[in-house]
Image (spheres, rainbow, N blue to C red):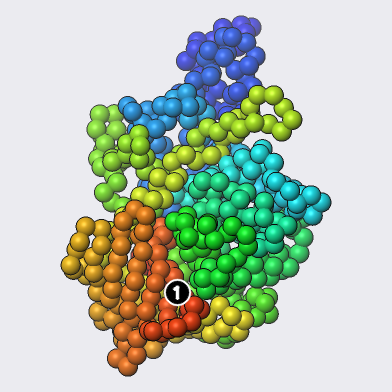
């Protein structure tokens, strides 16, 4: 029988392409012949497409459409992936990430456990390899929903992120080095908060993480309490921990705290709507669960790209959608690209493939798109009266009709600033009008609205994120720093349809 190495190169590549990425790497190390045949972009792309699960969101028609879209981005001229050894390394990174996807929650759990042990025994600086590993996994978890895999941020991931909240969001001086603004660099605080929101939108049905985190009820209460403290402290304008004010005032800090506010609202709505008792939320909500009508965004319906981003492909991609508008300086589609970090007590570097270099560009681009196109479609949402214990929470969390019929109209446009108005909006109180200013500048993406009822009015101040707009609302001429409440608006098409919404009953 002829040896495997005597097969034609094309046949060896077809066989190798059906293997997981780590097996391909092992095979390519056996001899020079197999290294030449297997260690190339085409083989890793075949492996990536074969082991990639079917998409579940509305971003792409199917996984083949996603792979075609990625191919135009990876293989095209002057694309960002041309650094880091070009398409070969990018497809290798993607293939390795997909190969490790089924057990990513296990890796996240090990990191969460090691962080908690480290904080207990030696609350010093986080090791560089641990920091890189955590940042890489957060990059993976925050990228997959954008590709069309919202279920990657499942309840198990939510529980593990909850497990890390008391450390990453701690205001204790002893744990300063583990705080989110110290231990997570660049866009990783945003990725943590984004993944936390997406995982909390999935509900909570834990099956796998009991051995890693212990009592999930205790973890849930502890993380909710920490989130409550941080979110309320931020919107109250309170200084939280040494040096944290710098992070609070930054653009990333404002966006991160806005996402944490969304996560706090989402977890409470989902928990109570499933029949949970308010006591499990440390008395955060006191409402009648029988009347709860949850209409939070469906993770699989959230749109992460604007329609302008797609165009009809040409050449071999004719008839398919491809990306436009990306440049080497401002890429707008997040890929998982290579990251080389120093190993602890080891020479050289090791390859960690979960970092997403383009995620930051996608995030900022998407925020600007929503800000500049705020007048497209209908907005829908909810608001709370405060985040104190026993706080009153309104639509949709008390069964009252949510804020709906919010359709903005632009006027008085001045570069990136313009006035908007949304008349004839409704909620559980009365009809109202939203009017005010949108600042769509790159460093702002901020809103200041007035919510005008027939008999009273409130001022809104918030930011726009890829998951909608949220912030604080106040009584006009409020002389205290504490807000009267909080709001969250999202696109109407992101939510599931139901009888009340479609018929108005």
Most distant residue in the bottom direction: 455
Label tally: 1
353 relative to 115, above or below: above
* Residue at left offset 39%, top offset 36%: 70
Q: Residue at x 49, y 41 (%)?
A: 356
Location of the C terminus (image quadrant): bottom left
Residue furthest out toward the right: 121
Task: Judge left or right: residue 478 versus residue 317.
Answer: right
- Nearest the eye: 254 or 317: 254
Whole-percent x and y of residue 310? 29, 44
Residue sitting nearer the eye, 47 or 371 = 371
> Which percent across, then down, holds residue 337?
49, 35
| Mark 1 crowd level (few <14, some 14–19, many ≥20, 10 Å Cα) | many
Whether residue 301 appears in this view of the structure is no
Residue beneath label 1, please? 472
Residue at the left extreme of this rendering: 412
| Res 443 seen here | yes
349 sits to left or right of 357: right
Where's residue 68, x and y in %? 37, 36
Residue 501 figure quarter: bottom left
* Nearer-the-camera pick, 4 or 329: 329
Residue 347 vs 111, above or below: the answer is above
Tell me where residue 260 appears, x and y as whole percent. Answer: 53, 63
Q: Nearer the viewer, residue 309 or 30?
A: 309
């Amino acid at each position: 029988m002829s040896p495997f190495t005597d097969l034609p190169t094309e046949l060896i590549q077809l066989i190798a392409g059906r293997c997981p990425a780590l097996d391909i790497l092992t095979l390519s190390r056996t001899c020079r012949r197999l290294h030449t045949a297997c260690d190339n972009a085409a083989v890793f792309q075949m492996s990536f497409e074969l082991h990639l699960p079917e998409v579940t969101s509305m971003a792409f028609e199917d996984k083949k459409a996603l792979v075609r879209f990625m191919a135009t981005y990876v293989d095209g001229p002057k694309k960002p992936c041309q650094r880091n050894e070009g398409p070969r390394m990018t497809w290798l990174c993607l293939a390795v990430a997909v190969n490790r996807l089924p057990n990513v929650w296990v890796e996240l759990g090990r990191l969460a456990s090691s962080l908690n042990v480290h904080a207990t025994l030696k609350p010093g600086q986080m090791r560089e390899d641990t920091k890189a590993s955590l940042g890489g996994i957060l990059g993976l978890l925050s990228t997959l929903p954008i590709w069309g895999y919202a279920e990657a941020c499942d309840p198990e991931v939510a529980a593990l992120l909850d497990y890390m909240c008391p450390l990453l969001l701690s205001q204790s001086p002893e744990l300063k080095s583990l705080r989110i603004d110290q231990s997570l660099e660049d866009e990783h605080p945003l990725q943590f908060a984004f993944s936390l929101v997406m995982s909390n939108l999935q509900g909570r049905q834990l099956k796998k993480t009991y051995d890693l985190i212990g009592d999930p009820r205790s973890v849930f209460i502890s993380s909710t309490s920490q989130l409550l403290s941080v979110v309320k402290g931020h919107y109250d304008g309170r200084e939280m921990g040494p040096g944290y004010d710098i992070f609070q005032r930054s653009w990333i800090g404002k966006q991160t705290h806005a996402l944490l506010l969304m996560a706090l609202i989402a977890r409470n709505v989902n928990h109570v709507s499933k029949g949970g008792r308010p006591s499990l939320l440390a008395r955060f909500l006191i409402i009648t669960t029988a009347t709860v009508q949850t209409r939070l965004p469906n993770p699989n319906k959230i749109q992460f790209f604007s329609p302008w981003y797609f165009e009809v492909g040409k050449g071999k991609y004719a008839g398919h959608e491809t990306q436009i508008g990306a440049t080497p300086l401002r890429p707008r589609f997040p890929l998982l690209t290579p990251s080389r970090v120093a190993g602890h007590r080891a020479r050289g570097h090791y390859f960690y493939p979960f970092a997403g270099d383009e995620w930051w560009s996608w995030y900022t681009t998407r925020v600007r798109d929503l800000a500049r196109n705020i007048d497209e479609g209908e907005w829908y949402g909810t608001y709370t009266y405060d985040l104190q214990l026993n706080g009153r929470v309104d639509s949709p969390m008390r069964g009252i009709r949510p804020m709906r019929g919010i359709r903005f109209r632009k006027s008085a446009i001045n570069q990136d600033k313009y006035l908007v108005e949304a008349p004839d909006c409704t909620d559980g109180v009365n009809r109202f009008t939203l009017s005010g200013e949108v600042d769509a500048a790159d460093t702002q993406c901020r809103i200041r609205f007035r919510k005008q009822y027939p008999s009273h009015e409130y001022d809104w101040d918030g930011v726009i994120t890829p998951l909608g707009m949220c912030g604080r609302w106040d009584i006009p001429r409020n002389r205290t720093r504490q807000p009267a409440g909080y709001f969250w608006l999202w696109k109407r098409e992101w939510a599931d349809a139901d009888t009340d919404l479609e018929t108005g009953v």
